[in-house]
Amino acid sequence: MHDEREHDRDRPAVRASGLVKHYGNVRALDELSIQIPAGTIHGLLGPNGAGKSTAINVLSTLVDITQGTAEVAGFDVSRQADRVRQRIGLVGQTAALDEILGGRQNLLIFGQLLGLSRRDAKRRADELLGKFSLTEAADRAVSTYSGGMRRRLDIAVGMILDPVVLFLDEPTTGLDPRGRTDVWNSVREIAARGTTVLLTTQYLEEADSLASQVSIMKAGRIIAEGTPNDLKRQRGGDRVEITAADQAEAIAMRDALNTADTSASEEAAVELDEATAVVTCPATRGTGDLATVVRKLDAAGITTDDIVLRRPTLDEVFLTLTEKEDA
Amino acid sequence: MSIVREGLILTGRDLAHWRRQPWTPIFNLLFTIMLLLMFAFIFGGSIQLPGGGDYIHFLLPGMMTLAMMFGLETTMTTMANDSKKGITDRLRSMPISDASVSLGRVGADMVSAVIEIVILIIGGLLLGWRATNSPLAGLVAVALLLWLRFAVLWVGIFLGLTTGRHDGATVLVQVLVWPVGFLSNVFAAPEFMPSWLGAVAAWNPISATATAVRELFGNPTGVTSGWLDEASLLAAIVWPLAITAVFLPLSARAYRRLRK
């Protein structure tokens, strides 16, 4: 299987075009097209009901396509579903594990179902338990596992056949920060070893930290795509953000910065959030603009120690994009 | 055959459950045994049988039949839980046959049905029940019981697949098995019921199996006339066959429809 993967390096691991999926009158996918290069982590980002899970269900052969075509690991999901199934791992939104049995037993049963002999399934189970730090809990009932452990076991089951593509549907929803970090590390390791990962998430931070490419979904279609940095740049680049002591000071700051003639205020885009007393202005020249802002405040006799240069978060990108769509 | 192999692996999964949580099947058995004792000692003394006969000999084959019918609930809830927890979806994303999932369910539930029958036979013998016919007839009786359980299995698989995500439906079925189970000749003879009710009870598929099993064990049937008296064996074969013929294809269809 590894040889085959090397051979397929240049082919996208997932390629879908014009995917449409109707559930009754609901158009869950509306002409969705996506290409994911082999060996990368791709984030599918969107609010509830955007169609992320439907996309995963279609690509993992669980659900028929109404219209369009999709290829996963080089095979057509409708006509060659079995070939696709031999090459994918699916980790759905709920941990699809047998709660009564232990982690090792889960891996054994699913491994044998996937065609491994009893002995191979055992060996693979031990290997995966080690890799996902579950060896100690291997024989305890899964119902006693923490959320993070459950998720890791869930992903381990998805990795039994060392799949070409791993689908992760909201892998960290409901986890505490520790559990989330563990899952993130596992996902990174999996990708580093050559498996292509398609993950859905509502957390922009997650996409930002894991994915090399992000697609933002809304109402069954992709409304923006690119690296996390590309997407942030679309929102208007870096900005200087100053937090004032109170509203009066914030207004004074805005007025000081609004006095024309420097680049920081050229676009007349100094914004004031009265409720939080935060003033922001674009900083197209990065730290140069930061210095300008400090000088201007100085000249106006205002001192501040809470001033930062920051990139927009994916959250802001996301909100801007989805609001634009609504308008 | 990979289907058989996959079915056996999934059956093994359920058997492993019993080893981990022996109390769940034991409580189920205790419940059946409690019903048996209740009817044997509390109601039994005041229930009359047309054609006479000792109530315990009438009751025990009825209880076995009822246990087969109550298996519906187990099949349905296990099936529903697997869908709810995403295990069914995980299995569907694997390169295994569609039939394996149901086959695993059939395997596990049939094994548990055999255990239930054995326990009820032992319990019955302790209470004074006896089978007076040949051992071969006894084996045919057990086969008919399992045949009913097999038919009911497909109803359970179908309901589990289609209503699995609605907890209300599960509860509804849990409630409905009672009147359906009791509106039969399991505990009392239809001939002593109001005539319209007796007719319904006699037509209940469970009554056919219960009567045939009583005959085969050499126990009193409580049936002195009518079609059930003449054709109970045939009915005990045909009823489950008809149920299976309807619900097996429906289950297969419901499984395929998960893709819609």
Image (cartoon, coloured by chain):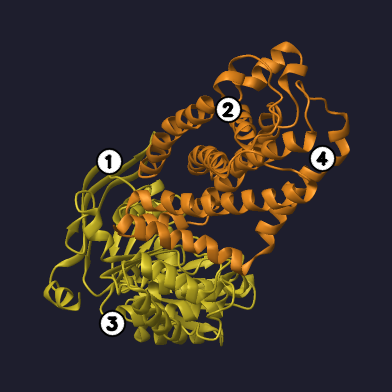
Going by the numbered disc 2, the residue's amino acid type is Pro
Q: Which residue is mark 2?
A: B205
- Frontmost of labels 2 and 1 is 2
Residue under disc 2 on the same chain as residue under disc 1: no
In the rendered view of the protein, which quadrant contains the N terminus of chain A?
bottom left
The amino acid at mark 3 is Arg
Would you say B156 lies left or right of A317 here? right
Mark 3–mark 1 Cα distance, whole angstroms, equals 34 Å
Q: Are marks 3 and 4 on the same chain?
A: no
Residue topped by disc 4: B40
* Chain coloured orange: B
Q: Secondary structure at mark 2?
A: helix
Q: Position of residue B120 (x, y in %)?
A: 69, 49
In space, the residues marked 1 and 4 are separated at their CA atoms by 59 Å
**Disc 3 designates what residue?**
A193
In terms of sequence position, does the residue under pointer 3 or pointer 1 come before the other?
A: 1
User: Is A94 drawn above or below residue B199 in the view shown?
Assistant: below
Give the residue number, with chain letter if any, for mark 1. A66
Give the Cα separation between the discs numbered 3 and 4. 66 Å
Residue under disc 2 on the same chain as residue under disc 3 = no
Residue B254 location (% of width, % of height): 41, 39
